[in-house]
Image (cartoon, rainbow, N blue to C red):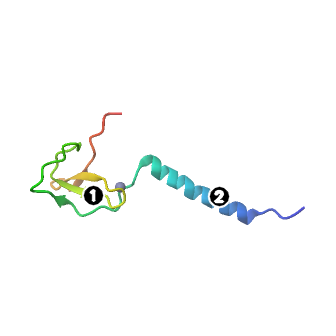
C-alpha cells in the first residue's frame, strides 16, 4: 500500500492546536496583555455604566475594554462582576 501521509497528519495536528488555543482565547476573553499606560481622567465623571468609579484606567489595545487602575496598589482593578 501507499506510504502513510504522516507529515500531513502532523500539520493537521499543529493546526488543531492553533485552533484550540484560539478557542480558549475566545472562551476566556482577551488576555489583555497589551494595554495603554494608565490614564487619569481628572475632568470627566466616572462612567455611569461602568462597574467601577476609579478615575484612573487603562484601555486594552486588543479589545478596547477599560479597566480601573489603582495607582496606590499599582494594580489593575478587576471588573466587579456578579458572583458566579
Ligand atoms: Zn483585551
Please indicate whether residue 42 sits to the left or right of residue 47 in the image.
left
Query: Which quarter of the image is occupied by the C terminus?
Result: top left
Q: Are marks 1 and 2 in contact (CB under 8 Å)?
A: no
Please indicate whether residue 47 sits to the left or right of residue 79 in the image.
left
Q: Residue at x 51, y 51 (%)?
A: 23
Element carrying mark 1: strand
Tag of residue 13: 2
Please indicate whether residue 71 sits to the left or right of residue 64 in the image.
left
Mark 1 vs mark 2, foreground winner is 1
Q: Residue at x 52, y 54 (%)?
A: 21
From this view, report whether residue 27 is shown above or below residue 9: above
Please indicate whether residue 83 sits to the left or right of residue 4 in the image.
left
The answer to which image quadrant residue 37 occupies is: bottom left
Element carrying mark 2: helix
Q: Position of residue 66 (x, y in %)?
A: 27, 53
Q: Is mark 1 within 8 Å of ligand 1?
A: no
Which residue does the numbered mark 1 point to in the structure image? 59
Bin the neighbour count of mark 1 within 10 Å (Cα to Cα): few under 14, some 14-19, many 20 and up.
some
Q: How many discs mark residues in the rendered view?
A: 2
The answer to which image quadrant residue 63 occupies is: bottom left
Q: Residue at x 27, y 46 (%)?
A: 78
Q: Nearer the viewer, residue 79 or 42?
A: 42
Q: Quadrant of ligand 1?
A: bottom left
Q: Position of residue 12 (x, y in %)?
A: 66, 59
Q: Earlier in the sequence, mark 1 or mark 2?
A: 2
Amino acid at each position: 500500500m501507499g506510504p502513510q501521509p504522516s507529515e500531513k497528519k502532523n500539520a493537521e495536528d499543529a493546526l488543531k492546536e492553533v485552533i484550540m488555543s484560539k478557542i480558549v482565547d475566545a472562551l476566556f476573553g482577551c488576555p489583555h496583555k497589551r494595554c495603554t499606560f494608565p490614564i487619569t481622567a481628572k475632568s470627566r465623571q466616572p462612567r455611569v455604566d461602568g462597574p467601577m468609579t476609579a478615575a484612573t484606567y487603562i484601555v486594552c489595545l486588543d479589545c478596547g475594554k477599560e479597566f480601573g487602575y489603582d495607582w496606590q496598589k499599582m494594580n489593575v482593578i478587576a471588573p466587579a462582576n456578579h458572583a458566579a
